[in-house]
Image (cartoon, helix red, strand yellow):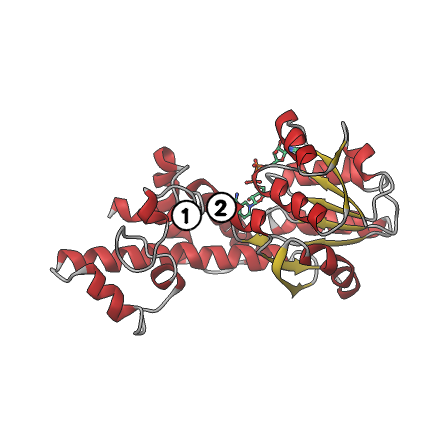
């Protein structure tokens, strides 16, 4: 299949390489010369504009930094410049309203489009083990699925346009809250004289069981191996968690949803990100 790929950065670079490995002809574009050079090395054909990359494409995949860029790329250079039979797949994490707006613009021109944000970081993008949460009509989901399967381990239809972004920000709001809660409980147990490893053993098999504790233990040398054991390098950066929390709080406001803990989590990560945006988000334990 001829697949145009726009946004070949930390995530997109590995994803495009996996499409090449799956036998697709990938037509890549990025504003960065370095990203283009890496994509070429990975077997992509590279172009100097989005319009050239999407010409003749049967699918377009994008992995871009934010909603404003996604909107501008699609409305200026993808919609109307890509063959109308192509499936448009935006994998970036962006706000729900923009995802719906771009999908509406694509539908108005007769395109199939899905929002398909991912769970999993750079390692999962390189390893082809991302989870995709997909919003869009079922025929668009069916068309996007084989493309996404070449880059991930799970492809889940979440609902209509914007449902993928909704799933992503609600999940990450829950993750931020549970990470802060896990960190608080571990530090409090330690301060009260309980061996943190004992606390992990007990709580990970009790009602305190959660992903942040069981699969991503935020304290070095305790529980499972995680970024905490590597100086909080790698993993999921605090700056990206803050981006998702801001998107979640914007969406909560538009939906009139009450999210007191989400709001507090955003405040806590906002303060922490001032000096630690590059550290893994579990490093929040250092503030307690
Ligand atoms: P990145 O900054 O490494 O990559 C983005 C790429 O887009 C860059 O190479 C940049 O040059 C390119 N770009 C920007 N504007 C462009 C334009 N107009 N046309 C073409 N290319 C353009 O970011 P990333 O870490 O790859 O993240 C991409 C998306 O994935 C974001 O929405 C992010 O929230 C999401 N995400 C990232 C992670 C992660 O761990 N890094 C995890 C899950 C989701």
Asked whether residue 101 appears in the rendered view, the answer is no
- The residue at the point 87 percent across, 42 percent down is 56
User: Circle 2 is placed at which residue position?
Assistant: 246
User: Circle 1 is placed at which residue position?
Assistant: 266
Question: How crowded is the residue under tag 2: few (<14 C-alpha within 10 Å), some, or many (20+)?
Answer: many
Question: How crowded is the residue under tag 1: few (<14 C-alpha within 10 Å), some, or many (20+)?
Answer: many
Q: Is 84 displayed left or right of 200 in the figure?
A: right
Camera-nearest residue between 210 and 1:
1
Q: Residue 44 appears at what percent x and percent y? A: 73, 38
Asked whether residue 195 appears in the rendered view, the answer is yes
Camera-nearest residue between 232 and 111:
232
> Callout 1: helix, strand or loop?
helix
Q: Quadrant of ligand 1?
A: top right
Q: Kindly report the distance in space between the C-alpha atoms of the residues bearing marks 1 and 2.
A: 7 Å
Q: Is the C-beta of the residue carrying label 2 under 8 Å from the nearest atom of ligand 1?
A: no
- The residue at the point 20 percent across, 65 percent down is 198
């Amino acid at each position: 299949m001829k697949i145009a790929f726009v946004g070949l950065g930390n995530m997109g670079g590995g994803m495009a390489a996996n499409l090449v490995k799956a036998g697709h002809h990938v037509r890549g574009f990025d504003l960065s010369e370095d990203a283009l050079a890496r994509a070429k090395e990975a077997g992509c054909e590279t172009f100097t504009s989005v319009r050239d990359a999407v010409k003749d494409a049967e699918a377009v995949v994008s992995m871009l930094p934010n909603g404003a860029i996604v909107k501008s790329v699609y409305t200026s250079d993808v919609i109307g410049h890509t063959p109308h039979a192509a499936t448009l797949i935006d994998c970036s994490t962006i706000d729900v309203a923009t995802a719906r707006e771009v999908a509406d613009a694509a539908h108005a021109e007769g395109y199939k489009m899905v929002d398909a944000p991912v769970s999993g970081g750079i390692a999962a993008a390189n390893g082809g083990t991302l989870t995709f949460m997909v919003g869009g009509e079922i025929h668009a989901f069916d068309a996007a699925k084989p493309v996404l399967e070449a880059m991930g381990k799970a492809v889940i239809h979440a609902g209509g346009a914007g449902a993928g972004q909704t799933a992503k920000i609600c999940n990450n709001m829950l993750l931020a809250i549970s990470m802060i809660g896990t960190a608080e409980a571990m530090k409090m147990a330690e301060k009260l004289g309980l061996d943190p490893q004992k606390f992990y053993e007990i709580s990970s098999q009790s009602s305190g069981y959660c992903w942040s504790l069981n699969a991503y233990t935020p304290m070095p040398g305790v529980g499972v191996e995680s970024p905490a054991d590597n100086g909080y390098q790698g993993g999921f950066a605090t700056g990206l968690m803050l981006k998702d929390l801001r998107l979640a709080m914007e969406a909560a406001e538009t939906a009139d949803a009450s999210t007191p803990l989400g709001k507090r989590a955003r405040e806590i990560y906002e303060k922490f990100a001032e000096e630690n945006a590059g550290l893994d988000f579990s490093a929040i334990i250092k503030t307690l």
